[in-house]
Image (tube, rainbow, N blue to C red):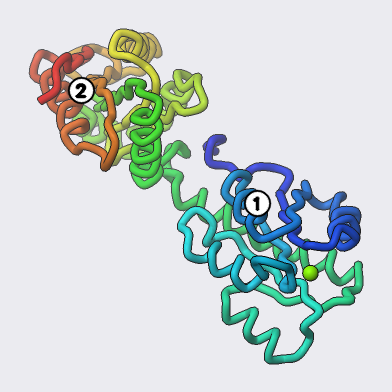
Amino acid sequence: MEKPVAPPQPPKVLVVDDEKQNRDLLAELLRNDCRVILAKNGIQAIERAHELHPDLILLDVMMPDMNGHQVIQALKHDDATRQIPVIFISALDSPEDEEHGLDLGAVDYITKPFHPSIVRKRVRNHLQSVHHRHLLENLAKIDSLTEIANRRRYDEALESEWRRCARNNSPLSLIIIDVDHFKAYNDRLGHAAGDMILRTIAIALKGFMRRPGDLAARYGGEEFVLLLPQVDARAASHIAGDIRAAVEQMQLAHPASPVSPYVTISLGGMTTQPYDGQVDPQFFRDADAALYAAKAQGRNRVVWQTTAG
Ligand SMILES: [Mg+2]
C-alpha cells in the first residue's frame, strides 16, 4: 500500500477551553488514546487547527472574545479545516442549544458537567470514524491492480507539488512511462500475464521513489507517471535512465516484441519551474511529447524535453 497517503498516527485531538481546569482534565482523560493539543481561546484554536491538522476538535462553547459557535463557523468556512469533526462541550444543556450546535456542523454535543468515561468513549468512537474515513479515502487513491497510486492521487499530488515548488522556487520533474508493445504481449501471453508485468514494473518504480514527495502512479492502461519535486532535469533524466535499465535487466521474456527479447519501457521526461497559480497543462504535454519521441525513435529509451513548448 502507498505509505505517503496513510493517516498520521497516533490521532491528534485539539481541546479548546478557556478554563485551565477543564483543559487539564480533558488532556488527562484522553492522553492514552491520542496526542492532545490545547488551545485556550478561539483565535488560538483556529491557528492550531490550521497548523497541526487535528483529527478531532473538542470545542467549548462559552469563551470570551470568540465563542465556540464563532470558532466552528470559521473552521467550516475554510477548506483547510472544514473536514475536521468538531464536538461541542458545553454547559448550555437545553435541547435548543444542542440542536443549534449540531446545525452549525458539530458531529456531537456533550454537556457539562461531563462524565469522564462517556467523553472518552465518544471521542474514541469519533476517532474510529475518522480512521475509517481516511482508509476509504486512501483506497480511492490506490490502483487496485498494481497497488501504487492511481491517476486521481497523481492529479492531487501534481497540484500540491506544483504549488510547493512555486513557493520554494524549486524545479518539478515529470516522467511518463509506457510499456513497449504491451498489446502484443497481452495478445500473445494473455491478460493475466500482462497484469503480472504491470505489477512487477510498479514494484520496480516504487523502488526508485526515495524522497518524501516522490510519487509513482499508474496513469492508465500500461502507462505510469513519476512525479519528482525538487529534482532538476539532470538528476531526473538520470533516474529515468536507471529505471529503463532496471526494467530491461529484469529480463522478463517478451516473445512478441520487435525491440528486445525482454519487456522494455519507453520514457519521456520534462522538468519545469512552477510559478504561482494553476498547474500548466503544457507540462504534461511536453513530457508526453518526449514519450512520443522515445517511441518514434525505436522505444526502450529515454527522451528528455529540454525546452518548454
Ligand atoms: Mg468556557
The x and y percentages for residue 202 are: 41, 29
Residue 29 higher or lower than 111, as above or below: above
Dot 1 alpha-carbon crowd within 10 angstroms: few under 14, some 14 to 19, many 20 or more: many
Residue at the far bottom in the pictured view? 95
Residue, x 27% and y 41% (percent of image)? Answer: 277
Residue, x 15% and y 17% (percent of image)? Answer: 294
Query: Can residue 251 be seen?
Result: no
- CA–CA distance in space, label 2 to label 1: 53 Å
Label 2 or label 1, whichever lies nearer to me, is: 1
Residue picked out by circle 2: 256
Query: Can residue 109 be seen?
Result: yes
- Toward the viewer: 54 or 127? 54
Q: Name the image quarter holding residue 220.
A: top left
Q: Is residue 140 left or right of residue 298?
A: right
Q: Amino acid at mark 1?
A: Pro
Residue picked out by circle 1: 54
The x and y percentages for residue 133 are: 58, 59
Label whose residue precedes the other's in the sequence (2 or 1):
1
